[in-house]
Amino acid sequence: MWLCDVLLGSNCSVWFNAVIRGDVNAITIGNESNIQDGAVIHATYLKASTHIGNRVSVGHNAIVHGCTVKDNVLIGMGAIVMDHAVIEEYCIIAAGAVVLENTVCETGFLYAGTPAKKIKPITDEQRALLNKLPDNYIMYSGWFTNP
């Protein structure tokens, strides 16, 4: 009996109390992505699968549900991304933001608020953070796999 449909890429990490629930639809997570403590990744039956790209950081207690998150994205702590939303490359979804159904977050911007709104282009420092975070989580995971 097959109970879930979850595909994790290489060098991913899934942290304490995170849930990746592929029971009702497919979930794919790309290479070098990290799903931090308490995050929930789910989908919607017969409606919306969930696709998370490469080098994505899903913050503590975030909910990613039935949506597409492209490469090099940060979903902040406690943020919610709902069905059929698309988060394009190099976006930051601020802590506590709520991205409503069918929203498209454009490449290279910070989104914040409830509902999430485009705030401003990300800075060079923020882009560097998006590139660095996945490397940090690969390092952290090594502390558990190679003590």
Image (cartoon, rainbow, N blue to C red):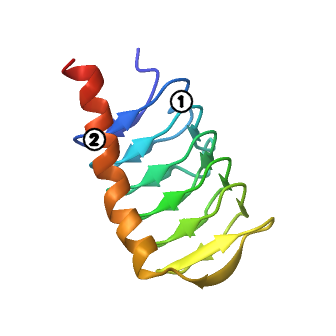
Give the residue at the far left of this rendering.
146
Looking at the rendered image, the quarter that the N terminus falls into is top left
- Closer to us: 81 or 127: 127
- Closer to us: 97 or 28: 97
Amino acid marked by disc 1: Ala
Query: Which residue, given by chain and number where applicable, does mark 1 sit on?
Result: 18
Query: Which residue, given by chain and number where applicable, does mark 2 sit on?
Result: 138
User: On the rendered structure, is 105 left or right of 132?
Assistant: right
Foreground mark, 1 or 2, reads 2
Q: Residue at x 45, y 30 (%)?
A: 15
Position of residue 83 relative to residue 46, above or below, is below
On residue 1, the disc is none
Q: Is residue 67 visible?
A: yes
Q: Position of residue 147 (x, y in %)?
A: 22, 17
Q: Position of residue 12 (x, y in %)?
A: 31, 40
Dot 2 falls on a residue whose secondary structure is: helix
Q: Residue at x 71, y 60 (%)?
A: 97
- How many residues crowd mark 2 within 10 Å: few (<14), some (14–19), many (20+)? some
Dot 1 falls on a residue whose secondary structure is: loop
Amino acid marked by disc 2: Ile
